[in-house]
Image: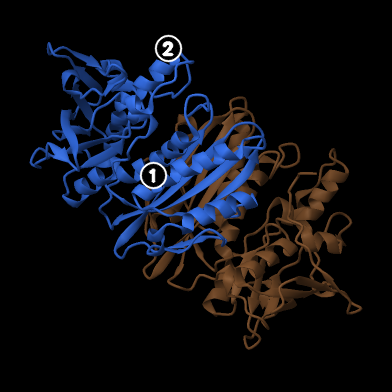
Chain colours: A blue, B brown
Amino acid sequence: MPLPEKSLIAALRRKASRTAWQTKRLITGIGDDCAVLQIPRGHQALVTTDFSLEGVHFRREWDSPEEIGWRCLARGLSDIAAMGGEPVAIFLSLALPAKLPQRWVNGFVRGLLDLASEFRVPLAGGDTAQSPADILADIVVLGSAPKGRAILRSGARPGDGIYVTGALGGSAAAIAALRGNPKVKLRSGDFARHFRPEPRLNAGRFLREHRIASAMIDLSDGLSTDLAHICEESGVGAQVESQAIPRAVAGRPPRAVDLTLALHGGEDYELLFTAPLVKRVPAQIAGLTVTRIGQVTRAKPLVLTDDHGRSTKLTPLGWEHFRP
Amino acid sequence: MPLPEKSLIAALRRKASRTAWQTKRLITGIGDDCAVLQIPRGHQALVTTDFSLEGVHFRREWDSPEEIGWRCLARGLSDIAAMGGEPVAIFLSLALPAKLPQRWVNGFVRGLLDLASEFRVPLAGGDTAQSPADILADIVVLGSAPKGRAILRSGARPGDGIYVTGALGGSAAAIAALRGNPKVKLRSGDFARHFRPEPRLNAGRFLREHRIASAMIDLSDGLSTDLAHICEESGVGAQVESQAIPRAVAGRPPRAVDLTLALHGGEDYELLFTAPLVKRVPAQIAGLTVTRIGQVTRAKPLVLTDDHGRSTKLTPLGWEHFRP
């Protein structure tokens, strides 16, 4: 686990060690062959890795380095949230073009550590390298959950209700606005879900602690695609009420997004979960609205029902980020 | 932790699930938001991440995809060995250019899983993405070691002996031969330490179990650089006897490498460790020769002593892979 760019190591190490919360679980951090970490007693380890690639997941001209760093980590923390887990430590592998201004790197690291500090997760290591052209980050998050209690994608059963936290399509609304006019300078505050998404760690933990969710996933690829993942892993189908889907309000002036963005837009990082009907699902969890949008079915195809009761097949479109 | 390239996920999943050994520690593997893993009771988690970048760490024209895949994982397992740890699971993040033949990808995965199966470590997840130009792999290895027993870089004390496993410079000899004649086709068997390095997991475990090593690192950047890492982390210096350094025998006809390659050549993935003089260090560990090459000193500079007893400063040159 070398971090060969000496100035970057030194900077990361200084920043990482300035955080008082890092000592409890992080036994040995940056500077050895491996990081050494204490998993809480009775817990199992959770591991997730996520690429953030320039031109695929972000564009330097559309996002500030702080926002790119924040979002890069949000993807990983959101995967921990989707298991109902606790984050333990993060690892950053970063390939950078030689000509990239140090200012950009500093901003990226600042954004990433801003989010890390919010959840008191230490940066425990990683790797750096020179990239021939584009910026490439790979974020690894180590987390934990009590033995046998991580919420998997495979636990949904016919009859379970289907729920989402928050509102959907807000991140895709920013991409749509940028695609419509690439020169436009969006205000972060008008599209917060795109620029600084909050991973739903507290809601995920609540759902695990209260044994409410039978299956869970985070909404990174879009509702239609991520619901299909749950259905595939659980061997079930789903019926979703289109008018029940909570649509994000974004932009200036603020307006509710189209159904298409709420159904297929990615990177909202809300939680999608199923729960048996006997469970009481609170209307709010950790300050977030929770909405029932449908139910798990025995029949395999995913079905969307409109407000006239008409049903059509719901096809997972798969979120393609910036690809046309 | 999405693996979005469907055919690659399916292939990896099939291959990963065909391995009978994966069930004990790997509770949930590829196909959920996170992998779920059982760390052995009383152990702490070890995590290491390592980039393998085309043009920096490998070249498609010099190495077969199987060898590149093998070496990519060897880097990570070697970091676990350097802590005296046990590997638990591996994660592969892979960015591939669109035009890369599927045959190359299959070969890469085969080489990586060949090494994984040798140490019975399951592939538990990762990420895939399309890369604009070059192949880029980031390997993450999760391991474990008994609480407080991982061997760090920081434990060397003045008076400790300095030891290496195996022989040094064998990998650099292959690079030197390729640099001398880029068109040459080297035989893997003539330069085994370059093409299929064995991570020294058994030797590392032995040194931890018998509480022999006071500090340890794996030789990825070259003896001069990696010894400097131990000295820096331990706040000590070192004196190395040049004639004591075991030089690899490589090439056709086989011959011992130059002192320069043994001192500064990287990627041998042997272990460099220190041990108090009161410890009995076996001449062989896990089938590997162990050689004493010097001693830890109080004075900070690294010193090289030749066979006439003359001492010069030993400057860490830092292994630059294929960079000129």
Question: Residue B34: percent from the left, percent from the top?
Answer: 37, 45
Residue closest to the eye, B105 or B290? B290
Whether residue A123 appears in this view of the structure is yes
Residue closest to the eye, B209 or A96? A96
Q: Secondary structure at mark 1?
A: helix
Q: Count of labels shown?
A: 2
Residue closest to the eye, B271 or A33? A33
Q: Residue at x 64, y 29 (%)?
A: B133
Question: Residue A53: percent from the left, percent from the top?
Answer: 52, 33
The part of the image, by quadrant, that contains residue A305 is: top left
Subunit ID for the residue under disc 2: A
The alpha-carbon separation of the residues under discs 2 and 1 comes to: 29 Å
The part of the image, by quadrant, that contains residue B153 is: bottom right
Which amino acid type is shown beneath numbered disc 2? Gly
The part of the image, by quadrant, that contains residue A187 is: top left
Question: Residue A13: percent from the left, percent from the top?
Answer: 53, 56
Q: Secondary structure at mark 2?
A: helix
Crowding at label 1, few (<14), some or many (≥20) Cα neighbours within 10 Å? many
Q: Which comes before the other along the chain, label 2 or label 1?
A: 1
The disc label shown at residue B98, or none: none
Taking B29 as reference, is A58 left or right? Answer: right
Q: Residue at x 61, y 72 (%)?
A: B234
- Label 2, on which residue? A180
- Label 1, on which residue? A115
Is B292 located above or below residue B247 in the figure?
A: below
Question: Decide: marks 2, 1 in contact (CB < 8 A)?
Answer: no
Residue closest to the eye, B164 or B86? B164
Q: Do the residues marked 2 and 1 share a common chain?
A: yes
Taking A283 as reference, is B209 left or right? Answer: right
